Amino acid sequence: MSSVATLHDAGIHGSHDVHHEHHHHETFITKYVFSQDHKMIAKQFLITGIIWAIIGGMFSVIFRLQLGYPDQTFPWLEDLLGHWAKGGKLHPEFYYALVTMHGTILVFFVLTAGLSGTFANFLIPLQIGARDMASPLLNCMSYWFFFLASIIMMSSLFVQTGPASGGWTIYPPLSALGDASQGSKIGMDLWLVSMAMFIVSSLLGGLNYITTILNMRTKGMSMTRLPLTIWALFFTAVLGVLSFPVLLSGAILLLFDRNLGTSFFLSDIVVAGKILPNEGGSAILFQHLFWFLGHPEVYIILLPAMGMSSEILSVNSRKPIFGYMAMVGSLFAITILAFLVWAHHMFVTGLNPFLGAVFVLLTLLIAVPSAIKVFNWLTTLWRGNIRFTPGMLFAIGFVSLFISGGLTGIFLGNSALDIHLHDTYFVVAHFHIVMGVASFFGMFAGVYHWFPKMFGRYLNNVMAYIHFWVTIIGAYLIFWPMHYQGLAGAPRRYYDWSNWESFKNFGGLNEFISLVAMIVFAVQLLFVFNFFYSIFKGRRVTDKNPWGANTLEWTTPIRPGHGNWAGEIPEVHRWPYDYSKDGKDFIPQDTPVGDDESKH
Amino acid sequence: MTSVAIAQKNKIHPHKFTLWVAIGSILMMFAGLTSAYIVKRNQANWTSFEIPVMFWISTAVIVLSSLTIVAANKAFKERAIGKYRSLMMVTMVLGVLFIALQVIGFKQLWDIGLTLQKNVAYSFLYVIVGLHGLHVIGGVIALVVMAAKAFSNKTRVYSAVPLEVMSTYWHFVDVLWIYLLIFLLLIK
């Protein structure tokens, strides 16, 4: 009798297999708001991410203004920020709030949800040959939890005592004690609740991505025929699903410490001459819990950018990706190592030096898979028939930034050097280049490359080229000098350096960095304009496969409906990188293998 | 049915697979908490504690409920709808009873002065057991929905997938509880 039940399960898939357009009636609400179409959810993530990126970027411009011009006042700041900028001078408490929120917004809301949320949702079903995600409902919920998290985080910007201001890493005891600072009051609670919602969103998304990739591939799409984008998004989801719950447990314990009088992270604390009753806790414990997520988080941000750049580099070099299996293997190695290096953020916490040595070794090991990837990207480009589309330029820019930022990681991974460099601008420069800007470049590459598939129109190329050149030159001009500031010992997160004799000579440099940051921010606004303008007014796509790419998303109609393919899902016969093979420019994945075809 | 659909049929159902990944994720949260517990235990200011007697009774209850949901599965596949309905009800009641026993256990601890704030050891006990309880409550809510569907005459359910997903989750919270109990007994 049990066969009756199982036969029916299969029937569910059978009925979905041949798709009927407009099978169900769609209202405005079901199409644009509570959509269960993975493509629409991807766009929701992308546009929410863009809004956050503007806010997060704006914050950095405001605090760069303080760093670049510490003795000047800007009356318009008071109009914008009210009591946080009395007389046009940024309040020190609010400076910390801005730094904290800049980090939180860009790390989590833009480069995690905005990046993975957009491209995992958009590309996974299209590139593996599926009608939609394994669970469209969970997918829809994933976005709305993210939206809820966004609303809560946004509201924390407007509370009387201001948003969280203990740094994006929210170390206790600062974050655990409401009396410790303005930002440790209600703003911190809102931060924690918002992050809990955000983690639920990430987990729902991650579950779906993993299941869809392993379970919903079309016929012939074996794991070794997956585009590298999908491999990267797969490992990203694995990292998220295994590391975010640990941050959640840390956040829960912190909420208990803040509101219910427990002492998980608190011990022997004196605030304003008053001894607190909390004892027995350990602040270092929080750092372990935080960085067990925090380090994988770096790769959650970086891997999608790696995957998309691999794909875009291959398509626009008209060459197969070099070392496909090595690329997959190095993604896997990075995923494993990501879980084993968290304590390299904690070298100066009094960590046992022997343990430190183990973490140094594991950290430096990451250089091996990273170098393999860089080598393969460069050899993919080598003697290729390169087309410098905007997407391609950003992918090349990603490789450049990944190399420059990765090299300084070798300095920081060394515990002896880290004693000097810890919490200086060297660290700021390192992670902004390798993880912040590099991932942004991967994201831009993805947007320029897949925009025609998302909206059926092209982005404007002139604006795109201005965007690229100003951003890459600007990124280096902003962050390169920070390495020197860091080597000289300039500490990060400081409101004003001008009281230190030793940092006085950096005044001019700081002003220069702030100026460039403003120019780069303005160019990002140009991109945002280009994005929204092109959705409505961009040049229309007339060719189903405008880049001449092999992957399955380009076999769908120019504006695919819910269900992606009008007829049957295509069958896959080959890997996705048959470019310039046997005299043919490209051979899509759904083309059967010919008898006289050479092996790749 | 096309070849693509046939290829799909031989794989594990996506909903079941999603649950397995989710279980891995939930386990990571408890792994985070229990490793924090171990780290903390090796530091100063730790007191060992006794597991309340109620937790032993609740263990028996949740193991029993795992058995009843197995029987409910069997009844569903035999299309013994009456038996299926009553077994689902029994599982649901046992789930609620489990929660009640945990709460009584906590109450007894609290009444003899072993409160949440008393010592980090007790804070951990409350948080870990409490978070497990929340996962059981989630399961009970799902059981209520499943039982309501079983009693509805309007919807005819033929697919065993929701029930199988439900059972797997229920066994998971059962096994997780037994693991946590052994953990708390061995390392205190």
Image: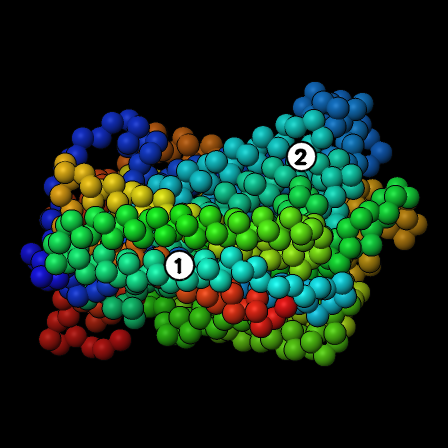
For label 2, the residue is A186
Side of A460 where A422 appears, left or right: right
Pointer 1 and pointer 2 on the same chain: no
For label 1, the residue is B62
Residue drawn at x 60%, y 57% is B125
The amino acid beneath tag 2 is: Ile
Residue B161 higher or lower than A76, as above or below: below
Residue drawn at x 65%, y 74% is A359
Image location of residue A577, percent across then percent down: 29, 66
Q: Chain of mark 1?
A: B
Q: Chain of mark 2?
A: A
Residue drawn at x 57%, y 36% is A153
The amino acid beneath tag 1 is: Ile
Image location of residue A105, percent across then percent down: 57, 42
Image location of residue A135, percent across then percent down: 29, 49
> Can residue A108 be spotted in the picture?
yes
Secondary structure category for the residue under label 2: helix
Side of B107 where A100 appears, left or right: right
Q: CA distance from mark 1 to mark 2?
A: 39 Å
Q: Nearer the viewer, residue A368 or A236?
A: A236
